[in-house]
Amino acid sequence: MCPINNGNERIQSNESSMLSREEIKSIESWISQMGKYQFFKTAKQKMVTAKKTLKFKYKMIGYGYNRIVYDLNNGYILKIALCEVGLIGNANEAYIYNNCNEEAQKYLCPVKEFGSGWIIMKKMGTKVPLAIMEYTKLIELELKFLRYGIIPIDLRLDNVAFSEDNEMVVIDYGLFTMDLKSPVLRWFD
Ligand SMILES: Nc1ncnc2c1ncn2[C@@H]1O[C@H](COP(=O)(O)OP(=O)(O)OP(=O)(O)O)[C@@H](O)[C@H]1O
Ligand SMILES: [Mg+2]
């Protein structure tokens, strides 16, 4: 597992206890060519191209604008960047999870390993009912993060899940920041 950095550093050791050497190589190859596809209009187009290039044996369980997500079938999921923002998101999640305060950590999906372009996290049940109570919980969660010094950019119901003890946890905190000088915030200049 590579050392956690501040989200700016891109050179990481790329070892994993869960991914094989070939799988890491396949990710490196995808990351080195993904720039060619940055003009694709939809997330689906990027996901399909990444999937074809990666040729993983794992089942894809989700994707967004920035990452493709595979189920490693051992209680963990693997997120691979689909673009620059995905690279920053992965590094950012690893950094925030490992550097935030203990209280805030309870509300973040645990990060297991992180490498160049990829991150492994605990698999969560993602079916969040779209009820008014869930929106209330989401707002409460937002306030908690702000209290802990984390700006929860892009916190929405699509990006949360429930833990075994029925606590709302964030599965996509790639755009959260603890640092007002973060590269994440530079996009909003
Ligand atoms: N820890 C997890 N456990 C189970 N499924 C997950 C987990 N993390 C992500 N997923 C699935 O993969 C999808 C995409 O993941 P994620 O939201 O992290 O990608 P993204 O590209 O950063 O998304 P966005 O478009 O919101 O920026 C999620 O909506 C969810 O369905
Ligand atoms: Mg998301």
Image (cartoon, helix red, strand yellow):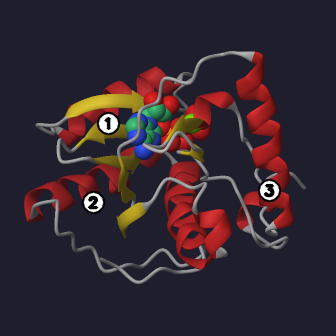
Q: What is the number of the mark on residue 22?
A: none
Q: What element carries label 3?
A: helix
The reply to whether residue 38 is visible in this rendering is no
In the image, residue 62 lies at what x, y percent?
Answer: 39, 29
Q: Do the residues labelled 3 and 2 touch (CB within 8 Å)?
A: no
**Quadrant of the frame with the C terminus:** bottom right
The local crowd at label 3, few if under 14, some if 14 to 19, many if 20 or more residues have their Cα within 10 Å, is: some
Q: Mark 2 points at which residue?
A: 28
Tell me the quarter of the picture where residue 182 sits: bottom right
Marks 2 and 1, the one that precedes in the sequence: 2
User: What residue type is disc 1 on?
Assistant: Ala
Marks 3 and 1, the one that precedes in the sequence: 1
Work out whether 32 lies above or below 95: above
Q: Do the residues labelled 3 and 1 touch (CB within 8 Å)?
A: no
Mark whose residue sits in front, 3 or 2? 3
- Picture residue at 53% right of the left edge, 45% below the top: 171
Q: What is the number of the mark on residue 144?
A: 3
Viewer-closest of 184 and 189:
184
Q: What element carries label 1?
A: helix
In the image, residue 53 lies at what x, y percent?
Answer: 22, 38
Work out whether 119 lies above or below 75: below
Give the CA distance from mark 2 to mark 1.
12 Å
Marks 3 and 2, the one that precedes in the sequence: 2
Give the CA distance from mark 3 to mark 2.
36 Å
Tell me the quarter of the picture where residue 3 sits: bottom left
Q: What is the number of the mark on residue 50?
A: 1
Q: Is mark 2 on a helix, strand or loop?
A: helix
